[in-house]
Amino acid sequence: MRAKLLVLASSIGMLGWGAVLPYQYAYAADTRGWGAFVAAAASSLFSVGALVAAPVAGRLSDRYNPVAVAVIAQLVGALGVGALVVVDTREAFLAGMFVFGLGLTAAVPAKQVLVLRWVPSADRRKIFAYKFTGEALGMAAGAYIAGHLVNLRDPQGLDIGFLTAAAGFAVSSLIIGLAGRGSDLHAGSDAVTEAALSASPREALRTIFANPALRWTAVITVTLALGFYAQFESGLPAYAITELDVDTTAIGTAAAVNSIVIVALQVVVVRLTAKRSAPSLLMAVGAIWVLSWLVLSAAQFAPGVAAALFVTTFGIFAVGETMYSPVLNPLTASLAPAGMVGRTLGIFAALQTTFSAIGPLVAGALLGAGLANGFLGLHIVISLLAVYAAWRLRAVMRAADPARNATTTALGDDAVLAA
């Protein structure tokens, strides 16, 4: 029951992402008249808040009750985004967006630790899959609600988005608090854990990346983020509009198809891949990324069906997404040093956030310079690098413990997660 409540809370907590982020740029730049620089700065500060929050929240989740970390983080986010209803200056708006990003992301490693502590090893991949699907549905629901109610011609026209985000955080916090009642989720007190908890951030980084498997996992995290997620909201739509001459309705359709495929296939894919090793599945994700970019590349040679190919590309990406989050997060946790699960997840979330923020800059530079083929080719190479990194990770894990890798699934390897 706790796991189901956490999935529900995670879904509701993502309402704000869909209700605010797709509209905040136009709201800041045009509705408020603050200009493109402030609008871009708001997006950047949201990402900076996320980057700052992830490793700190991960450390706190190791040291303290992760229920409290998740609840407090989301309540802070609710205050930040809720305050945007009453702000009238660009400085206050930027501060609110920073706190919004901080609160949203600080809850992520705490929720991941809760899955690892509340769910038996054999069921973790399934719960991570449900959690990922629920969050996608939450974002879609937030965007749908805001899309029908937001009025970007009115300075108060995005208030419904801000209030939806704040309410989502508050309700999510309430559900997590109720689910965590009576559970003792404080970090362990054994000598190894205490030593890990007292490690400085630099010592923690050295300990984490001293593990070759975690180094390759970091490469996978970065390349798979760059290979799709970094371009989902900006680079891919920009390419479609500027190079393929695709109508904006096709972009909306592609995003909808992406969500529909994830919802339709997530449970089926989890069942079909339950006995497959995590590195092998991540190799498959990288290969799917490569196929997607090849299909997208073909679109420029078939203008008549370019829109259809663009939508198809998002559907193909979605198939890889059904394996990405349910596999990568539990794998990262299983490889984490004892007592550093939260910090490891936080650091990897920060890596993903950092490179996802870099992605739009790369897309803007290449597409702005007329180097569309370079944009496509770069992402094919990045996706191939993800395949290679996953292959190297599989070799490292097999060499480290061949018997274990021959007899366990990718997710049944979480012995270090005992609280």
Image (tube, rainbow, N blue to C red):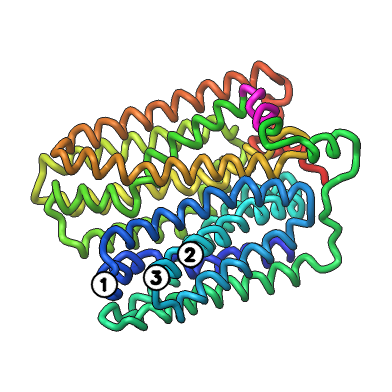
On whether residue 318 falls in the magenta region, the answer is: no
Distance, label 2 to label 1, CA atoms, is 17 Å
Q: Is residue 278 visible?
A: yes
- Badge 2: few (under 14), some or many (20 or more) residues near its Cα, within 10 Å? some
Q: Nearer the viewer, residue 125 or 274?
A: 125
Q: Which residue is mark 3?
A: 143
Q: Which residue is mark 1?
A: 33
Label drawn at residue 95: 2
Instruction: Look at 39% across and 60% down and name the residue there.
Output: 42
Q: Say what secondary structure mark 1 lies in.
A: loop
Q: Nearer the viewer, residue 219 or 26?
A: 26
Q: Which residues are magenta?
A: 205-212
Q: Say what secondary structure mark 3 lies in.
A: helix
Q: Amino acid at mark 1?
A: Gly
Q: Is residue 140 visible?
A: no
Instruction: Look at 83% across and 34% down and name the residue there.
Output: 195
| Lower position in the chain sequence, tag 3 or tag 2 | 2
Instruction: Look at 11% across and 39% down and name the residue there.
Output: 301
